Image: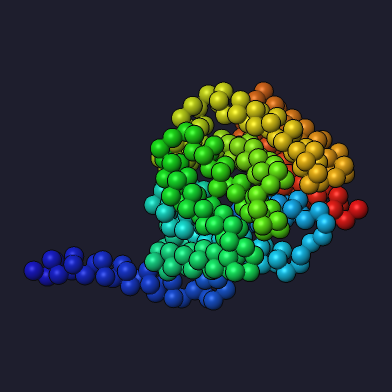
Amino acid sequence: MSQSSNRSSEPATAVSASDRAIRSRSVGEALWDYLVLAKPEISSVVTMSAFAGFLLGSPAGLDGWTLLWTMLGVALCAGGVGVLNHVLERRYDAQMKRTADRPLPAGRVDTDRARTFGILLACAAVGLLCPLVNVITAVIAALTAALYLFVYTPLKRVTKWNTLIGTVPGALPALGGYTAATGQPGPGGWAVFGILACWQMPHFLSLAWMYRNDYSRGDYAMLPVVEPDGDSTAAQMIGFAALLIPLSVLPTLVGSAGWIYGAGVVPLGLWFLWTTIVFNGERTGQKARRVLKVSVLYVPALVALLMVDWFV
């Protein structure tokens, strides 16, 4: 009888210990964990891509207030999606070395609180964008969240084409930045959408190659896991990096950007392409990391070119 009683009390004791561990953290530590849940490294790139779209949609001048609300709304949406993605993948994150110490699998943040936090961020984003920017940009933000969480995220464990499918929600914020400035999609908006879609493939495939063993442990159907020889991974990285070059010139051709941007973006794309070619010749984690590093620099460099082009 006493043994049964002891066994029944164990879960409650474990939960109490977990709760005590959470409550014993400082406010700074708790805030840091919530920041990590919002994926600031990804959210910043997403917000930057929206800024690029806004610049392309504002050749005659920037509307400062609209830009401010757009950047805030996009950042909130990206952060909310990041938090909810952590919630959806917490069990799989616990199986991978790279992600096992994230706040949810490590037990530092309560799942229900994280879910509520993510929903609040996403709803605040749409609620802000709709009245203060325009309806179409708010719809794009909502569509981005829905596609990322309910299409791309589950497909990561179903099909090797998940990365390609994920380029759609990944590139929509750039289009949203354009519609924030113009009120409607246009050639420049679709051009920046295509640029961000192509950019994502070498970026995420290089990451997937570096952590392919981890992804295998987490039961993810990433391309380097499904086809470990790397032929398809390298071919897609090269193909999309090559397609990125003519697409990146489109803003100049359609009149959304000037010659400074056009002249600078081509060598930038060639540099990116070269790293994927080098990876194909030597498919190591080191060469994949080089592709990843250049891809991380690509979007800020693109924005810098647009800013120089816009101010000159």
Please name whichever residue, 289 or 198, is drawn nearer the observer in this view of the structure: 198
Q: Is residue 253 visible?
A: yes
* Residue 255 sits above or below residue 240 on the image: below
Q: Residue pushed farthest left?
A: 1
| 73 left or right of 145 in image | right
The percent position of residue 210, horizontal first and vertical second, equals 57, 38
* Residue 133 sits above or below residue 174 on the image: below
The percent position of residue 55, horizontal first and vertical second, equals 76, 54
Which residue is located at x 52 percent, y 71 percent?
Answer: 30
Q: How is the image coloured?
A: rainbow
Please name whichever residue, 115 or 131, is drawn nearer the observer in this view of the structure: 131
Quadrant of the frame with the N terminus: bottom left
| Count of marks overlaid on the render | 0
Which residue is located at x 82 percent, y 60 percent?
Answer: 61
| 3 left or right of 189 in image | left
Please name whichever residue, 108 or 51, is drawn nearer the observer in this view of the structure: 51
Task: Residue 267: name its quadrant.
Answer: top right
Which residue is located at x 28 percent, y 70 percent?
Answer: 13
Q: Residue pushed farthest right?
A: 312
The percent position of residue 3, horizontal first and vertical second, equals 13, 66
| 198 left or right of 268 in image | left
Q: Is residue 40 visible?
A: no
The percent position of residue 234, horizontal first and vertical second, equals 61, 27
| 251 left or right of 224 in image | right
* Residue 184 sits above or below residue 232 on the image: below
